[in-house]
Amino acid sequence: MASAGSPEGADRVRSLRAGRRVALSAVFEAEFGQRTATAILERQLAEVEADPAAGLLARTIVDGVVANRDTIDARIELLAPQFPVVQMARMDRALLRCALSEVLHSATPPRVAIAEWVELARIYSGDSMRRLMNGVLGRISRETPAIQASTPTSEEGLSGHDLRQAQEDRRRAARRR
């Protein structure tokens, strides 16, 4: 297996990122109700002649969203009740659904999937969605036994972003009470 630092590893990382973006695009487009996410994905993969690894990951993510959407939405509502799924922007909803699908229903190591989806949330939605994504996926990884074995325990956090800042914010808020 090639490491991420090697040329083959870097190509694989780029390929899997492309797969995530294609999956996100299909789930987002399906939000408009014209076609199913699966049909959209197959059309997109045929148009771009995607790398087999990217296509496999994209299909896994989209299939997980399609098959488990109600369960995924219920978990989002449970973990972030202040952000009702039906009231979220379409892109935010698609980001969370795809991320939970990959973390819960794929062979991707959860730590890798979480870091990748937090970064995609930052790119496609913004910093507030990145924080929400990190929080929801972090709670999922802590609460799901199969995922716990591979989650980080360092201060770096799940995505490597802002865990220390979030802890400091909580401490300040607690002091104000």
Image (cartoon, grey):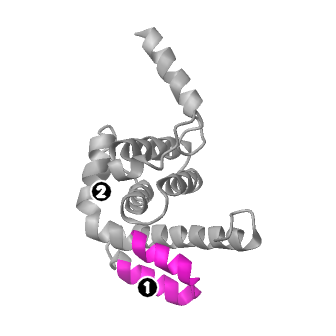
Residue 55 covered by magenta stretch: yes
Q: Is residue 70 left or right of residue 128?
A: left
Q: What element does badge 1 sit on?
A: helix
Point out residue 14 in the picture as x, y percentages from the top left corner. 65, 69
In the image, what residue occupies the spot 54% across and 76% down?
54
Assign the C terminus to one quadrant of the image.
top left
Name the one closer to the observer, 108 or 42.
108
The mark nearer the N terminus, 2 or 1, is 1
Assign the N terminus to one quadrant of the image.
bottom right
Point out residue 148 in the picture as x, y percentages from the top left corner. 41, 46
What's the mark number on residue 72?
A: 2
The amino acid type, in three-letter code, at marker 2 is: Ile
Q: Is residue 7 left or right of residue 152?
A: right
Neighbourhood count class around disc 2 (C-alpha, 10 Å): few under 14, some 14–19, many 20 upward: many
Name the one closer to the observer, 6 or 48.
6
Q: Which segment did they paint magenta?
A: 38-61
Which residue is denoted by mark 1 in the rendering?
42
